[in-house]
Image (spheres, rainbow, N blue to C red):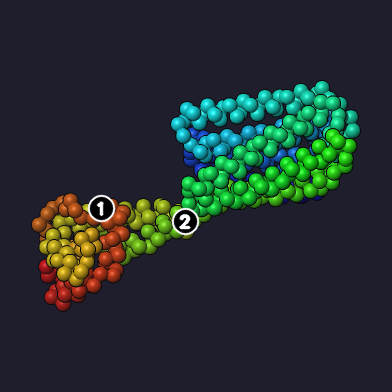
Amino acid sequence: MNGQDYYIPAAALAVALAFKLPALRNNWRDPLLRSVCALLILAGSVFTFAAPPTIAAVNGWTGVTNFSAPLVYCLITMFSASCLVLIVNWRGGPPEQTRRTSRRWIVGYGVIVVVLVVLFLLGEAPVERLRDFDTYYANTPYIRYMIALYLTAHLVAAVVMVAMCLRWSLQVRGWLRTGLMIIVAGYVFNLSYDATKISAVVARWFGHDLDDLSTYAAPPLASIGALVSAVGFVLPLVCQRMSDNWQTWNTYRRLGPLWAEVQPCAPSGTPCVKMSWWSPPELRVIQRESDIHDAFLHLGPYFDERHRDRAYELAVAGGADEDTARTVGEAAMVSAAVRAHAADPDGRTIGSREDLPPDTPTGPRDLLGVSQALRDSPVVAALRGAATLSGPGAS
């Protein structure tokens, strides 16, 4: 593998991290989000510093032959710890127990990092190896233990990651479950990476040569595993965000008939807020709901419960259930209030109530129901047509 084969998965992990950063910025105290971001940062660092061009550059900068070896091994070990901490936080449970377990994994793997550095300092690795350090020094005193230790730590983390993700996937549904299964697939490649590396090193211990497994087979497996895992981490977030945006845009669209109905009744001094094309859909929905509520306040004196009761009775007679009939009645009352307001340009008419009735639609769900009834209900259409024929001021 050349440098690009390492830098491409590093870039993919950076993209995955970019998708997570907005959520982390908004909820920094969430240990799960912090764990995910730490995992992505460390995984990207592993591929960046494991690339042969980076290895040569780091060795040259430090002036220490094979300095990159313990550096990469320590990064891999910290990455393994981040996997375990992520799973602990993902699994959930009592906060104190979760923090305690996370600290144990962090401390345990922190000790391993220190031991790796000590073993490298005790051993001798005078010949620079950019691609086959593991097998070349597999039988070197102290260095062999460093290699075995980092591979074991990575293997344990990969096994736990697969087991926990599989268990978690049985408890969830939707995009989260899909993402977990993709992560499992990615870690199967990681386990294959461990298998090839360990096989090559053990073969060296017994005087055999399976170096090609470590030099040529293992790196592509690690690269594929990283890319697949990155997709697993990003997919639930992206798809959930797309789903949320779709639901928000759908809410904005469904509020359209009610908004169009009451807009002529908005207070004359109300400023018209124009949204730019890049305005988030959540802000558009809030603005539309605000416009509707402002119009309701202005229509308060014109609301007449007789229109609501009449429409309710007609809807029930037509076979509508209780909730639908109530919504149809509210929609008919709103429509009648708009007509009454239009027929009273000087504001002289005062309805039976000065304030908005307690059961007038005020929540988002009621607004959606009223808007749909204004658009689809034959009862509302019939009462609106009858009122139009009898005159704008008819009640």
Viewer-proximal residue among 2 and 370? 2
Q: Which residue is mark 2?
A: 243
246 on left or right of 300:
right
Amino acid type, label 1: Thr
Mark 1 surroundings: few (<14), some (14-19) or many (≥20) residues within 10 A: some
Q: CA distance from mark 1 to mark 2?
A: 25 Å
Q: Residue at x 42, y 57 (%)?
A: 247
Amino acid type, label 2: Ser
Viewer-proximal residue among 253 and 229? 229
Q: Which residue is mark 1?
A: 362
- Judged from the image, the secondary structure of the residue bearing numbered disc 2 is helix
Q: Residue at x 20, y 58 (%)?
A: 299
Viewer-side label of 1, 2: 2
Q: Is residue 6 above or below residue 29?
A: below
30 on left or right of 82:
left
Mark 2 surroundings: few (<14), some (14-19) or many (≥20) residues within 10 A: few
- Judged from the image, the secondary structure of the residue bearing numbered disc 1 is loop
**Mark sitting on residue 288:** none
